[in-house]
Structures are given as structure tokens and as C-alpha cells.
Image (spheres, helix red, strand yellow):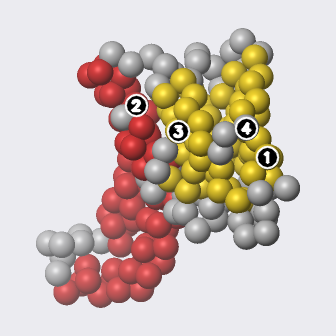
Amino acid sequence: MNRFCDVMNTNYDTDTVVALINEMKVAIEPAIEEQSNRYPSSVSSVSSWESNIEKMIQFAQERTGYVQGFLQSRFTLPDVVTVTLNTDSGVGYIRINDTDITVDTRGVSDASSWSGSYFGGTTQTFTAVALDGHTFVKFIVTDTANGMTTEYTDSIIEVTLGSGETVVQVIFE
């Protein structure tokens, strides 16, 4: 379940998928009119092609909600909650489960403040990774549902998510 959420929050993040669809659209668009003229059974018109692009974008925008709903129903999971990771990405980064939250990770636009969706009640593994010349100091984890904040001095921690947003901050020096 966690790996599925990791991938939905990065590779299949709505903005990432829509950007890729638009990138491909721009690359293919110059050939569509000729394709339509030469092979009308494959592309009946430029407007029908554009309509199909819009359908793909709509699918990408709605996909996460449908998938989360399916998983909740199929596995009797609690509601989805937000996990927010905050750090100074110039000195280190956070790994959630097996996913490094860096600017090199597809779907991560801001490695200093990133949010993803996970199911409440699941246990997530957070690892603080210091860049060369820096060291890990501590994690500060806040469960916003109950307002409880806990500090951890281990560089790898496991946190069971509550019913509200969980904010994980890592401090490096």
C-alpha cells in the first residue's frame, strides 16, 4: 500500500502526468493534420485528436481519487491523510519509505517542502539523508489532528499516521 502511494505521489502525480501529456502533445501536434489526411481511420480530425488529449488530461486529474477510493473500499482502509515533509534541501533530504524526496525525483518540484497522500493508520518509514559536510540533528513530527509534536534523534524512524495531516521536519547542521 505504501509503495503504491509513493508512486502515486511522485511518478503519477497529477501535475507530472499532465505536464508529460502536454509535452507529448507539443511534440506530436505538427504531424496530426498530415496523419489525419493520410490515415483518417487513425485520426479523424485535428479537433478529435485534441478532444482525446483533453480526455487523457481529465483522466489524469481524476485518477488519484478513483484509485484511492478503490483501495479504501477493497482493503477497508481509513481516510487519506496528507504527509508534509520539510527540510533544507541544500543540506539534506528525506526519504519516505523507498522514495527519495529530491528535485531529481519525478513529481517532486520542491524538495524543501513536499506533500503526499497516504492512508491514515499506516506506518511510514522516514530516513534523514545528510549531504556531504552536514549531519543529521533530529526529526520533529507533528500530528495535526491532536496537536502532538514528537522529536526523534534517530535518523530512521517509523511513524504511524493519525487521522489528520502529519508534518515531518528534519533538522540538519
Residue at image position (41%, 85%) is 30
Q: Height in image: 129 above or below 151? A: below
Inter-mark Cα distance, 4 to 1:
7 Å
Instruction: Find residue 153 and name its label.
Output: 4
> Reading the chain from its start, which is encountered first: label 2 or label 4?
2
Tell me the amino acid under the disc marked 4: Thr
Kind of residue at badge 2: Gln
Would you call the spot at circle 4 few (<14 residues within 10 Å), some (14-19), or many (20 or more)?
few
Image x and y of residue 27, in percent: 44, 82
Tell me the residue at 17%/81% (across/down). 39
Residue 114: image location, x then y, percent: 67, 47
Q: Is 84 above or below relative to 9?
A: above
The residue indicated by pointer 2 is 68
Element at label 2? helix
Q: Element type at marker 1?
A: strand
Q: Nearer the viewer, residue 118 or 53?
A: 118
Reading the image, the residue beneath label 1 is 137
